[in-house]
Amino acid sequence: MIITFVHHSCFVAETAERTLVFDYFRNGRVKGYEFSGTLPEFDRRKPLYVFASHFHQDHFDPEVLKWAEEHPKIHYIFSKDIRLSGSYLERNGISPKIKEKITFVQPLKTYKTDDMEIKTLRSTDAGVAFLIRTEGKYIYHAGDLNLWKWDGAGDLVNGKEMRAYKHEINRLSEYAIDVAFVPLDSRQKKYALEGLSYFMEHIDAKAVFPMHMWQDYSYIAAFKSKVSNGAFAKRLVDISGENETYEILDASL
């Protein structure tokens, strides 16, 4: 499996039989940030599956709907909170027929797309997280499912966030995940490591890619310096910038 970190929460996973794209958006969509990530060249002989975990601009871009013009074997898996009315599609120059290629998903459901099984979790922000079984492997993309604790929010709010996050992540405990994409949000400062730490401690995931870092990759080293279990540090993939590619062999780096 080839994994490409495009930018922010956008990854491309290319397997022997298909290509999966998660939470793509163009540079310029998010004010105040210059994202330089570019998509790799897709093998047009393979089916292309495009996932969007929710409607936020740093996770969904209507531009992806135009890819169908060049990729006939394309299918979209979108969270149901992504609204695609006829007028919206028209404004963006997209044919309403595109909806025939879209599966809209809700939290806590299981879907079949071709021979892929897709389970959804409820996000602690908006939309869903995805657990995908394909070609005998499990791939997890969290979207905005994270432990959203904030300095100044207070114990009541932060405690509620913690309980909600742990409740959802524990749904993954029965699975052996091969590749996981998990938030490590630098804006949370002293709380930035907590969601990732809980995930690493409670979920069997062989290779974990941090994401949603807002171009601050320093927290990866901070996590590795704090964990007492060296196996955790080894499982967390070092990302230093956009457009990096990794080869996963037998689900390990």
Image: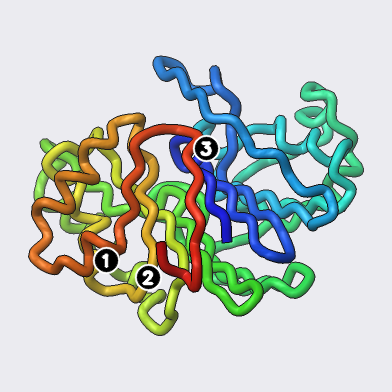
Asked if labels 1 and 3 touch by Cβ distance under 8 angstroms, the answer is: no
Which residue corresponds to the image point at 70% horizontal and 32% vertical from the top-left? 62
Q: Can you identify the residue that label 1 sits on? A: 200
Quadrant assignment, res 182: bottom left
Can you name the residue that lies furthest to the bottom here?
Answer: 174
Q: Amino acid at mark 1?
A: Met
Q: Secondary structure at mark 3?
A: strand
Picture coordinates of residue 175, whole percent (x, y): 44, 80
Q: Which residue corresponds to mark 3?
A: 6
| Picture residue at 69% right of the left edge, 55% below the top | 19
Which of the two labelled residues, at mark 1 and mark 2, occupies the earlier sequence position?
1
Residue type of the residue flagged with mark 2: Ala
Q: Are marks 1 and 2 in contact (CB under 8 Å)?
A: yes
Q: Which residue is mark 2?
A: 205
Quarter of the rendering occupied by the C terminus: bottom left
Q: Residues within 10 Å of mark 1 (few under 14, many from 20)?
A: some
Name which of mark 2 and mark 3 comes first in the sequence. 3
Relative vertical location of residue 28 with respect to residue 63 in this rendering, above or below: above
The answer for how far apart the CA atoms under marks 2 and 3 are is 21 Å
Q: Position of residue 88 (x, y in %)?
A: 76, 29
Q: Amino acid at mark 3?
A: Val
Q: Residue 60: x and y, percent?
A: 59, 37
On screen, residue 65 versus residue 133, left or right, reads right
Name the residue rendered at 12%, 60% in the picture: 227
